[in-house]
Image (tube, rainbow, N blue to C red):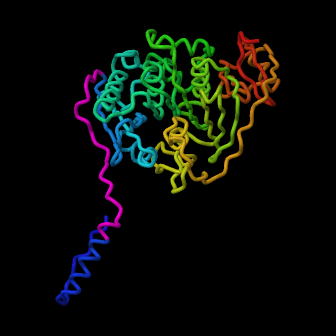
Amino acid sequence: MISPLPLRRSWPLTALGALLALAGLLVATLTAPPARAASLVQVSSFGANPGGLAMYAYRPDGLASGRPLVVLLHGCTQNANGYFTASGWRKYADQWGFALVLPQTSSANNASSCFNWFETGDTTRGQGEAASIRAMVAYAVANYGTDPARVYVSGLSAGGAMSAVMLATYPDVFAAGSVAAGLAYRCASSLTQASSCQYGATSRTPQQWGDLVRGACSGCPGRYPRVAVWQGLSDYTVVPANATQLRDQWTNVRGVPQTPTATQSLPGGTSLQVYGADDVRLYQITGMGHGLPIDPGGAADQCGATAAYFLDTICSAYHDARFFGLDGGATTPPPSTPTPTPTVTPTSATCVYASNYAHTTAGRAHQSGGYTYANGSNDAMGLWNTFTSHTLKQTGPGYWVLADGQC
């Protein structure tokens, strides 16, 4: 920070000079923009905390009661302040008027300061870390005047997986959420299983994935949140199969097909697939590794700061905030890079049952690391061999989806 220059007086002011100086000071005071006092603060006591988490919160200056809340969950080796600084969410909290809550875990909970998205005791409604995060939301509703109908969650990596946990265990609390480089709910229930999920595909049908969510809150009403999924296609820490598994899980829970209703090309090598009536979104970014998509700059759709696991591609916070409806439907300046009109995917379908090996040799699927993935949808099909067989359905040119039991 640059220190102010010292005031120097080399001659005495005349009475007129003093009057003019005073007038100038008054004008400057009246016309200067107000200082921004809001900052990220720790809330020392927010209620029951069985997960042993810390709560940090940000409320823009002058935030009125009845405004939305976004819960942000950091990744491994990160903390609340670093995520707040680099993710880009502060820009839109200030611009569109909503509060942020950033739970923070520690090495006392997990050696790498990851949220324990794979531990049953932390991913069950009313228990562990999930219950602590829920308590933070209740605190915000009671003390910040947060609108309980407009609460959202977003996170990266382990924080992304924990976002899926919160959406599954508290569908009555969260209206929508986003998962960046994360994993499907209950993909794992142990550390060993967690590694298998991260680095390879898990063989479950959309119905089985959906059942895991439906079993997370048996007494909850049948309304489930809308979900956006972000995935780098060169991510070798949480492989892209996890994104399609998240897609399968939440389209099934929302009761919409795993075939996109629209596709769109976005900046930063990003493709967007929309499912149902904007029930689920899948963003896939060519060439991006493991991290949260950000795009530093001053345009309306630019945000964030580059750092470890904050990768310069596209501002995910901008797209998520609009997906959540936090812009209030207001007209915003055009994005820095024009985006084409979404193209509706053809609905005609052809079904083929064959082994994973036969699907790949026929051009309906491809293999990577010994696992098989459907071309176009990237649906996980299990091991690449002649013994594992699946039905694939073609829903567009070069676009195949896993359709076991659907044809």
What span is in magenta? Answer: 28-50
- Return the x and y of residue 178 as percentages of the image width and height: 51, 32
Q: Main secondary structure of the magenta part?
A: loop
Quarter of the image containing the N terminus? bottom left
Seen at 78% across and 24% down, the residue is 347
Seen at 39% across and 28% down, the residue is 148
Quarter of the image containing the C terminus? top right
Determine whether, in the image, residue 278 is placed left or right of residue 186.
Answer: right
**Can you tell which quarter of the image residue 109 is in?**
top left
Determine whether, in the image, residue 242 is placed left or right of residue 155.
Answer: right
**Can you tell which quarter of the image residue 97 is in?**
top left
Residue 74, relative to residue 203: is it above or below? below
Name the foreground residue: 145 vs 279. 145
Task: Residue 72: tell me if it is visible.
Answer: no
- Return the x and y of residue 258 as percentages of the image width and height: 67, 22
Task: Residue 249: tell me if it is visible.
Answer: yes
For residue 214: magenta?
Answer: no
